[in-house]
Image (cartoon, coloured by chain):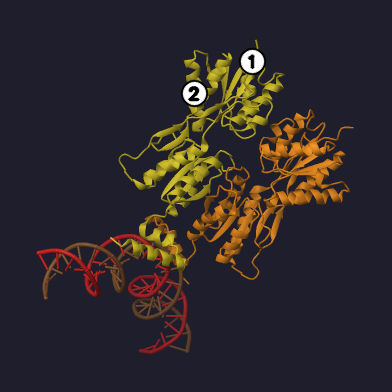
Chain colours: A orange, B yellow, C red, D brown
Amino acid sequence: MVHPQTTERVLAVAEELGYTPNPLAKGLRTNKSMTIGMVISDIENPVFGPIIAGVEATVGREGYSTLIAEAIAHDPAALTPVIDALVDRRVDGMVLAMATRSGENAARLKRLGVPVVLVNRAVDDVEVASIVGDDQFGIGLSVQHLAGLGHELIGHLAGPMETSTALGRLQGYHKHMEELGLDHPDSAVESAEWYQIEPGYKAAGVLLDRRPDLTALVAANDLIALGAYRAIRERGLEVGADISVTGYNDMMLLDMIQPSLTSIRVPYREMGSEAAELLLQMMTHPDPESEPHGTKRLRPSLSARDSTQPPPA
Amino acid sequence: MVHPQTTERVLAVAEELGYTPNPLAKGLRTNKSMTIGMVISDIENPVFGPIIAGVEATVGREGYSTLIAEAIAHDPAALTPVIDALVDRRVDGMVLAMATRSGENAARLKRLGVPVVLVNRAVDDVEVASIVGDDQFGIGLSVQHLAGLGHELIGHLAGPMETSTALGRLQGYHKHMEELGLDHPDSAVESAEWYQIEPGYKAAGVLLDRRPDLTALVAANDLIALGAYRAIRERGLEVGADISVTGYNDMMLLDMIQPSLTSIRVPYREMGSEAAELLLQMMTHPDPESEPHGTKRLRPSLSARDSTQPPPA
DNA sequence: CTCATGGCTACAATCGTTTGTAGAGCGGCC
DNA sequence: GGCCGCTCTACAAACGATTGTAGCCATGAG
């Protein structure tokens, strides 16, 4: 109801005076800080870079800024104070990229009425919106790829079972082995204590000693797979020629390693932007009834390399 | 001047009522947002993870939160709007982790009275506080290591000259070669267009064609060094045995590559926390006269691996 | 001439803090 | 008893926006 010309004049003067609205005053009055909080459990893990970038770019387009907080520890209790700090700052929403499967923090946020989206890792006991990779599908790609090469005795090096990704990948292994009519006994599965080379090496050693007949190993993560390289070599075998190995995440430099590691590429940046999109929707349409709480799974793809070859004759 | 017991009672009631101070109101009144801005030029680069973690942890201890913004582009002009967005949000200070050597953005922030610290990359035309790695010293470690192995014909694969790190490493090469009494003509130096494998491969090809007598290459970065691997192999030579190679940054998985790459480890997390420390000091003691504007250089260390061996007889 | 209407100006309340001032209650000191 | 200092309560202004209300001045319709 105001003349366009007047609007323009006001804007021009504002510009001339160098006026910029004070977001603190605005936030105080409107009770919206135009800020979202993002909690990262392990910021040094390179997968989080693209996730952060995706979130930041997407919410930024709607005028939101991103407050980053790191929670170094692996246990959920240590997360609570850092989440609280963000809530005290009156963030309008929250993206959680956590290590654990426990949903207590997400549940608390929901109780406080703070919109929350989980990214990368889901929780299994609480209904909360999350964007994750389709781990079952991804492991399926590996299993099918190996089966296509002629492997029948395929083992699984699982991740730490307190993470949702490890669980999904384990389930994917069983499911797709079953579908292909291949054996998948518990004896063909060994879990690594953490997503690192050393635990992967240990788990692979245990698995190879128990089941020396395996011709392929599907690892829950690239570093576990690289740990398996060492265990395989220690037994005088050759990765690829004697035992095929697949990783998961398709991290940088895998193609430079000998032999280059076949892996599953996860669209992390897209994961971040989808999570942000969902959060924006929850923040702008606070529809308490139909609030999204499902888990959206993004489909990864296979990067086939030299670590997977037909089984020895 | 208030009784300790009263304080305690007030605090107890506050706790009971679930009172948390509203930082927006506080910021409005005090004109301090207790927030710092952090601009990252390329968040997918894994070196920034530790830097962010270091900054966040350090300022967090003093009650500050960290607002993250990414500026994807490499040119300084694209940075301006994202810096402005942070300034408009009334951040109390700013940490810039940029790609370019241009100081215009830092200069503008100083003019606006926003305390600013540069991290990882310095600028050469403006007096601004910065925390960077000691590139000359780091390259010195590589050069001395190679000279100690018996190399005399050592070339340098430089980085893109628009970055301060590339410049410092180039200078370090010349300086330390000079000190050791070794030849370091311009013909032994070739610059890669970017800190990536492909440009490194190209530059190494040019350098090896021009100076086939070189027995060692000091690269300005790990990826450039890995590009050199390919160029060396293409010429029927073996990395390590025929031509030694060193990288810079000591990124993950370098020890898994064949041959494992000798590199320079930079204390990135410490870099982040030192930058934060400096920024805190500037924000709390706004001493316009003696404002720090020097460059602090953190000393890296050498990780010797198989890519460096004595020159062929 | 009156009155409704569109487009504007002016003013006040509110958000939750910080900061400052005024005054009340109460003990001890001269 | 009067005065001072200590501790506390009470109240108001300010920060910079949003939001709502009231009034002003044209213009044009009745």
**Marks 2, 1: nearer the viewer:** 2
Q: Is residue A197 left or right of residue B174?
A: right
Mark 1, secondary structure of its residue = loop
> In the image, is residue B146 above or below residue B77?
above
In the image shown, does A87 or A205 lie closer to the viewer? Answer: A205
> In the image, is residue B247 above or below residue B116?
above
Q: Residue tagged by mark 2?
A: B172
Q: How far across and down, in percent of the image, does residue A79 sit?
A: 56, 53
Q: Residue tagged by mark 1?
A: B212
Which residue does the image show at 54% across and 20% down from the upper left?
B143
Q: Amino acid at mark 1?
A: Pro
Quarter occupied by residue A123? bottom right
Residue B232 visible here: yes
Q: How far across and down, in percent of the image, does residue A301 sit?
A: 74, 45
In the image shown, does A73 or A178 lie closer to the viewer? Answer: A73
In the image shown, does A36 or B5 lie closer to the viewer? Answer: B5
> What is the chain letter for disc 2?
B
Residue B105 visible here: no
Q: Residues within 10 Å of mark 1 (few under 14, many from 20)?
A: few
Q: How far across and down, in percent of the image, does residue B311 sit?
A: 63, 14
